[in-house]
Amino acid sequence: MTAFSLEPARLAWCAELRALAAERLRPLAGKGEPGRVDRALVAELGTLGLLSRLFTSGALDLCLMRESLAHACTEAETALALQGLGAHPVHAHGTPAQRARWLPGVSDGSVVAAFALSEPDAGSDAAALSLTAEPDGRPGPAEPAERDAAPDAARVPDAAPAPASLAAHPDGRSGWRLTGEKCWISNAPDADFYTVFARTTPGAGARGVTAFLVPADRPGLTGSRLDMLSPHPIGALRFDAVPVTADDVLGEADRGFRVAMDTLNLFRPSVGAFAVGMAQAALDATLAHTARRDAFGGKLKDLQSVAHQVAEMALRTESARLMVYAAATAYDEGAADVPRRSAMAKLLATETAQYVVDRAVQLHGARALQRGHLLEHLYREVRAPRVYEGASEVQRGIIAKELYRNPEDR
């Protein structure tokens, strides 16, 4: 893997990450259960020091980690990314007490985080959230022994004890009660805490949303698993008057959309890096296969139609890589056009990976569709990134909006 902007030390680090992913992480991932959080894998990421780097590295290093891990072990890449996505709002917007309570466990892999934004009727349109946070003057969170488990839903696993006292709500009352549902939430219902976005001001659109840090053992919080094409854990959450207080707010009340967008602007380019890692893995497999496969009196690579397809795969992969690095560098430098660059990087890279993996499957033939083949795995993995953290159509909308807002960026 080369790029004009990467110095030898970073290239060496990427090679080391790919080796770690292949030698230490992939064997662990193979023992995990699809659709559930692989805590052994998360713990190993912590032992290797990769999770702590989520909070000490910039966007470019995050992209390099995700790309390198994805090349050899998509499960490890996803486990790392989900820890970062769920915990970044705490790192960037949490109070000192919130950071001290949760981030050490996220860093060492003993605590699993999740980012709970999407709802059954509010996915790409994040401003349409309907999970409500109603002001409440009732007593605060009960101790675990006082809770009654809901009969028709799995109780979210216990994590940290709930706060012993309620902080004052801005209107003088004790806090809020969260009521509604979240859906398509990665790491649900296995996470130990959730960054939850709820509507605190009805009718205010994006300006009436608040971000809350919700421990998984809060009374009234239940979850269920969703059986998805992608093999990583995804679930739904139900909030039945879940108590939260001012101590649980991330950032400011009614300013949670800013927390969400800050997180997504950082992680969207790194979704692109994940996609580039998968595209590179598919390209590498295709180069090896077409060089050794006998066909029509020669090797498959000797057919011009095949060679041109491989060249196109390489061209698109490198183009996407450079776009991702440029977006990450812009984020690290605090550039004004980060939203546009982030959207472009995610859009180009995820669409590219879909193309490259599909072409790789076609050039491998039926063997690539056999369960357990690398490309069969990548084919299932590559589809979701075009949808989550803002679908491709949403990214195009962001790009167009930013271009018309800032004509000089055209």
Image: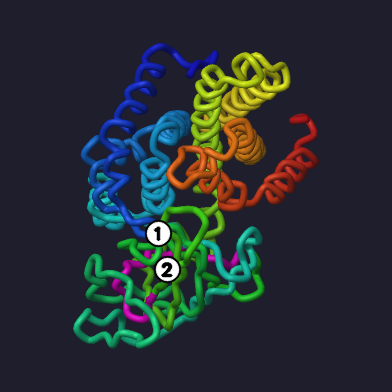
Which range is magenta?
Answer: 207-222
The residue that appears at 51% across and 78% down in the rendered structure is: 180
The picture quadrant where one finds residue 327 is top right
Nearer the N terminus, badge 1 or badge 2? 1
- What whole-number distance in Å separates the C-alpha atoms at marks 1 and 2? 8 Å
> Which image quarter: residue 222?
bottom left
Amino acid bearing label 2: Arg
| Mark number, residue 35 | 1
Query: What residue is rendered at 40% in x and 77% in y?
Result: 175
Q: Nearer the viewer, residue 196 or 391?
A: 391
Marks 1 and 2: CB-CB under 8 Å?
A: yes
Residue 211 included in the magenta stretch of the image: yes
Residue tagged 2: 225
Q: Which is nearer the eye, 63 or 26?
A: 26
Does residue 149 appear left or right of residue 238 in this picture?
A: left
Q: Amino acid at mark 1?
A: Gly
